[in-house]
Amino acid sequence: MAPVLVKHIMTAPVVTFFAEQTLPLADDVMRIHKFRHLPVIEPDGRLVGLVTQRDILRAQISSLTGLSEAERRARQDEVRIAQLMTRDVWSARPDMLASHAAQTLLDHRYSCMPVVNAEGILCGIVTERDFLRFAVKALMQHD
C-alpha cells in the first residue's frame, strides 16, 4: 500500500477569512456552515493565521451587558479577525505523511492544521474529522 499523504485526506478548497474582516461575519460563517476553525490569508493566498470558534466566542460581547442586540452587533462590527486570530500556526505540507500530521495534532492537542505549499500558500486544511473519515473508510474495507 502506498503511503497516505496529507493531500489524500485534507479538505480543499477551504473557506477562508481576511484579517480585516469582522467578528460578526466570522461568527455567521462559522455558525451557518458549522465550521470550528478557518484559516486567515493574505490576498495572495498566503496563510497568516487561524481563527477558531473558541476565539469567536471569547470575543463576543455578553448579552448580560444590558446592550441591545443592535448595539452589541455594532460594537462587534469594530472587532477585526486580526485581533482574534492566532498568528503562529503549525501547518502541514500536502506531501507530508498523514501519520506525521496526525501525531502532531495528538501531541499538541490541535484540532486542525492548515495545509500550505512551499510558498506558504494555503491549499487545504486537515482536521480531526478528516482523520476520522479516513479511519472509518479504512475500517470498512476490513469488514
Image (spheres, rainbow, N blue to C red):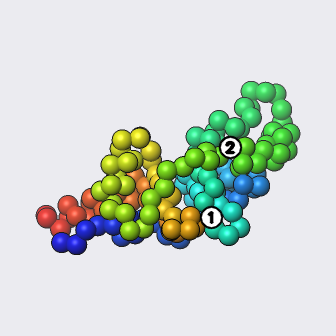
- Binning the other alpha carbons within 10 Å of mark 2 as few (below 14), some (14 to 19) or many (20 upward) gives many
Q: Which of the 4 image quadrants contains residue 120?
A: bottom right
Q: Nearer the viewer, residue 3 or 30?
A: 3
**Residue denoted by label 2:** 84
User: Which amino acid type is marked by label 1?
Assistant: Arg
> Where does residue 129 sit, x and y in percent of width and height?
40, 55
Residue 109, quarter of picture = top left
Residue 115 visible in this rendered orientation of the protein:
yes
The residue to which callout 1 is attached is 46
Mark 2 and mark 1 lie on one chain; the one further toward the N terminus is 1
Determine whether, in the image, residue 81 is placed left or right of residue 126.
right
Q: Residue at x 67, y 50 (%)?
A: 27
Residue drawn at (32%, 62%) of the image: 97
Label 2: state its secondary structure.
Answer: helix
> How far apart are labels 2 and 1 at the CA level?
18 Å
Q: Position of residue 103 (x, y in %)?
A: 33, 49
Residue 67 pos. (x, y %)? 83, 32
Depicted 60 relative to depicted 17: above or below: above
Image quadrant for the C terminus?
Answer: bottom left
Q: Residue at x 69, y 63 (%)?
A: 42
Above/below status of 135 relative to 75: below
Q: Element under label 1?
A: loop
Label 1 packing within 10 angstroms: few (<14), some (14-19), many (20+): some
Percent x, y for residue 118? 51, 68
The structure residue drawn at horizontal position 68% and vertical position 53%, both measured from the top left corner, is 26
Q: Nearer the viewer, residue 86 or 128?
A: 86
From the viewer's perspective, is residue 44 above or below residue 82? below
